[in-house]
Amino acid sequence: MRAVDVNTGAALTEEAAEKLINTASVSGRNMVGGAGQLKLTECVETLEVLRNDLDIEGDEYHQLAEIQNSDFVNQQIVSFREFIHSKIKDIEEIIRNLRAENKLRVIPANEGRIRKNRELLRIKEEQLNAQRKFTFDPRDVCLGVIRVL
């Protein structure tokens, strides 16, 4: 969050800005005719500076969040892939034991379990890859003027 004192141009700390915005949202009220009591050119200039700063920060945030999100998705895929490969390895061991014991009738069912696990892996990877795209809408950024009396 950002806030700037229009009179001095001084930026408030992030903590002070958050406190101001929270207080205004809880206790503030709309002032009828309030725009007439403000120096609109200074407000517009300050808002433009803030908008430019927020655009730059938004781009940086989006890039960082996309990298973090991609890393998270990669970690999920690797983890799930290892889990499924471990299950398949166990089933293949069961199939080897069944062949050794000449119990061939249940082998096709276990081969089906392997196919099902591979299909589950494919579907899960598709789902996770779909989550790779991080969306950030600059319209989620809000600008406003808070008059403190």
Image (tube, grey):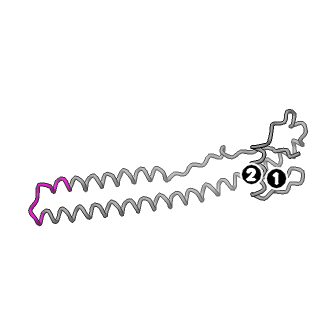
**Where's residue 78, x and y in %?**
41, 62
Q: Residue at x 31, y 52 (%)?
A: 119
Q: Residue sitting at 11 percent across and 58 percent down?
A: 104
Q: Is residue 94 above or below residue 49?
A: below
Q: Is residue 117 left or right of residue 9?
A: left
Residue at image coords 75%, 45%? 143
Q: Residue furthest top?
A: 32
Which label was assigned to residue 4?
1
Q: Which residues are magenta?
A: 99-110
Q: Residue furthest front?
A: 27
Residue type indicated by callout 2: Asn
Q: Between marks 2 and 1, how big is the CA–CA gap?
A: 14 Å
Residue wearing tag 2: 52
Q: Residues within 10 Å of mark 2 (few under 14, many from 20)?
A: few
Q: Position of residue 21 (x, y in %)?
A: 76, 48
**Counting residues from the N terminus, which is met first, the one under dot 2 or under dot 1?**
1
In the rendered image, residue 31 lying in the magenta stretch gets the answer no
